[in-house]
């Protein structure tokens, strides 16, 4: 099973353009990620980083070339892909329901004890204990009552509860003030240290904790190496 055995996520000569557009976003990109590895993806705005993430997760298919998780195209996993790959977006997705339900999405059988445990790990347990309705406090779609950093922590809690082997962070802390951003990144790095991690970032801070850094340019990997080499 991919979840427990060593695996690899392999892109080979991937070409991609959005439907009905001429602009080639990925133009022959190749990349391999092994289980346990930590990869940082850098590149200017519009370089195709989020597009690459959607291909990794199988949300989109390449026009040519392949995106394989242990030799199976990620697009063939369908909904099952969420058992393998979790993603934290720039804008956390929160739902107009309780804290409990927000953390349990995709993992409805989790116990309240398990939810408290991940809230503890992301540094939110104390705040939620103090709310009059505790775990049953409504979050609201806009994350009402939760600061930007707290919303990011809630989405990390959801990923930790699901315990997927591969986590993708797509610029998960943009828009936070620098101090909060650093605190959130520190929590992410600490809690995800045993995972396969793909981190789309504009930050050089924290890069030294990664095994591999790539720079995306003109639809290809323009520069790749370990943090020390770059
Ligand atoms: P940023 O750092 O700003 O998040 P990015 O590297 O993630 O940028 P992408 O979001 O992957 O860049 O976008 C790459 C290119 O694809 C951009 O030129 C963008 O306008 C285009 N693009 C993104 N989504 C679509 C879409 N759904 N349809 C058509 N073009 C799109
Ligand atoms: Mg992006």
Image (tube, rainbow, N blue to C red):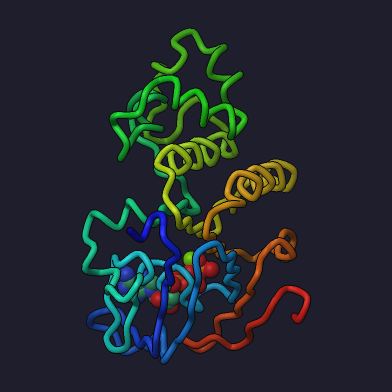
Q: Quadrant of the C terminus?
A: bottom right
Relative to the observer, which residue lies in front, 131 or 199? 199
Q: Quadrant of the N terminus?
A: bottom left
- Relative side of 13 to 132, left or right: left
- Relative side of 109 to 139, left or right: left
Relative to the observer, which residue lies in front, 175 or 221? 221
- Above or below 179: residue 15: below
Q: Quadrant of residue 73?
A: bottom left
Say which residue appears at 60% left-offset and 44% top-offset: 191
Farthest top residue in view: 132
Say which residue appears at 59% left-offset and 34% top-offset: 122
The x, y position of residue 10, in whole percent, is 41, 78
The x, y position of residue 150, in whole percent, is 56, 34
The x, y position of residue 148, in whole percent, is 56, 39
Q: Quadrant of ligand 1?
A: bottom left
Farthest right residue in view: 228
Relative to the observer, which residue lies in front, 19 or 129? 129
The x, y position of residue 129, in whole percent, is 54, 14
- Above or below 18: residue 112: above
Relative to the observer, which residue lies in front, 185 or 19? 185
Say which residue appears at 42% left-offset and 25% top-offset: 99
Q: Quadrant of residue 109?
A: top left
Say which residue appears at 40% left-offset and 72% top-offset: 51
- Above or below 133: residue 30: below
Total count of labels: 0
């Amino acid at each position: 099973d991919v979840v427990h055995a060593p695996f690899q996520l392999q892109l080979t000569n991937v070409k991609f353009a959005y439907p009905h557009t001429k602009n080639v976003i990925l133009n022959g990109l190749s990349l391999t990620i092994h289980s346990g590895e930590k990869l940082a993806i850098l590149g200017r705005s519009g370089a195709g980083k989020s597009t690459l993430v959607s291909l990794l997760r199988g949300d989109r298919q390449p026009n040519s070339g392949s995106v394989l998780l242990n030799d199976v195209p990620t697009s063939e996993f369908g909904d099952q892909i969420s058992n393998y790959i979790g993603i934290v977006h720039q804008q956390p997705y929160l739902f107009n329901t309780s804290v409990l339900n927000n953390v349990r999405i995709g993992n409805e059988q989790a116990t309240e004890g398990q939810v408290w445990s991940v809230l503890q790990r992301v540094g939110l347990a104390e705040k939620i204990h103090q709310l009059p309705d505790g775990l049953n406090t409504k979050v609201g779609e806009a994350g009402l009552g939760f600061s930007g950093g707290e919303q990011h922590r809630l989405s990390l809690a959801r990923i930790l509860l699901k315990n997927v082997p591969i986590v993708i962070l797509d610029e998960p802390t943009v828009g936070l003030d620098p101090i909060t951003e650093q605190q959130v990144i520190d929590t992410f790095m600490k809690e995800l240290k045993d995972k396969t991690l793909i981190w789309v970032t504009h930050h050089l801070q924290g890069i030294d904790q990664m095994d591999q850094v790539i720079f995306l340019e003109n639809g290809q990997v323009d520069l790749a190496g370990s943090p020390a080499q770059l």
